[in-house]
Image (spheres, rainbow, N blue to C red):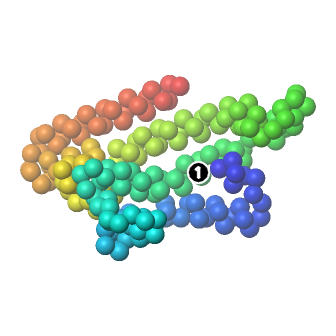
Amino acid sequence: AAVLDKLEGKAESFFRCVLFLPNVISVAVIAYLWKFIYNPDFGLLNNILHAFGQKESVNFFSTENAIWAVLVVLVWHGFGWGMLIYYTGIKNIDPVLYEAAAIDGIKNRFQEMIYITVPQMKPQMLFAAVMAVVGAFQNGLISTQLTGNPSPGYAAQLIVNHIEDYGFLRYEMGYAAAVSVVLLLIVQIFSKGANAL
């Protein structure tokens, strides 16, 4: 967001759109796209690894790799919201603060970032953190569509997948409801704690 703020004109608009684009795409389309990227036979990532000399293809949905494959997709998918929150926060910082800091002796962009930008961005950082944690508890759909439910060896099983697995596949509704209530309490406690800050 800080780099994007320094761009001007069409470059700023272009990169703002490109960085936010994953959030506009449907979750089903994203999962389908990343299945092709991760494919062990003809996927983009394995072709890149082969170009760098690796002989054997990597199964990104194996028990060891599944959670990392899902996390990469979740971070890529959620990157645009974080960028937008921080970008808006940076745009709302009063330029007078930077001018005053220059008079007071701040010499470079790193010092500007540490002493002005980051302290002024505290509300946006807190909001982004709360949204990221709450969103992390809801992102079971991508995991299910990438690895299936349950995932191989339960390696990429998120809490929402766990609730779905017990509630709708095993028909243990009481247990699934209890886990849902615990999830609700965790999200409530985190949201209230962040609100108190």
Query: Compared with residue 47, is residue 62 higher up or lower down, i.e. above or below?
Result: above
- Residue 167: x %, y % from top left: 15, 49
Foreground pick, 146 / 196: 146
Q: Horizontal placement of 143 versus 30: left or right?
A: left
Give the residue number, with chain letter if any, for mark 1. Answer: 83
User: Residue at the location (50% across, 29% down)?
Assistant: 195
Q: Residue at x 42, y 54 (%)?
A: 72
Residue 189 coordinates in the image, percent (x, y):
38, 29
Secondary structure under badge 1?
helix
Name the kind of residue labelled 1 in the image: Met
Residue 80 location, quadrant: bottom right
Residue 106 seen in the figure: yes
The answer to whether 33 appears left or right of 107 in the picture is left
Residue 172 pos. (x, y %)? 9, 45
Q: Residue furthest bottom?
A: 42
Q: Give the crowd class for mark 1: few <14, some 14-19, many >=20 residues within 10 Å.
A: some
Please name the residue shown 69% across and 44% down the image.
90
Direction left: furthest residue:
171
Instruction: Report the residue that reaches farthest toward the right.
Output: 103
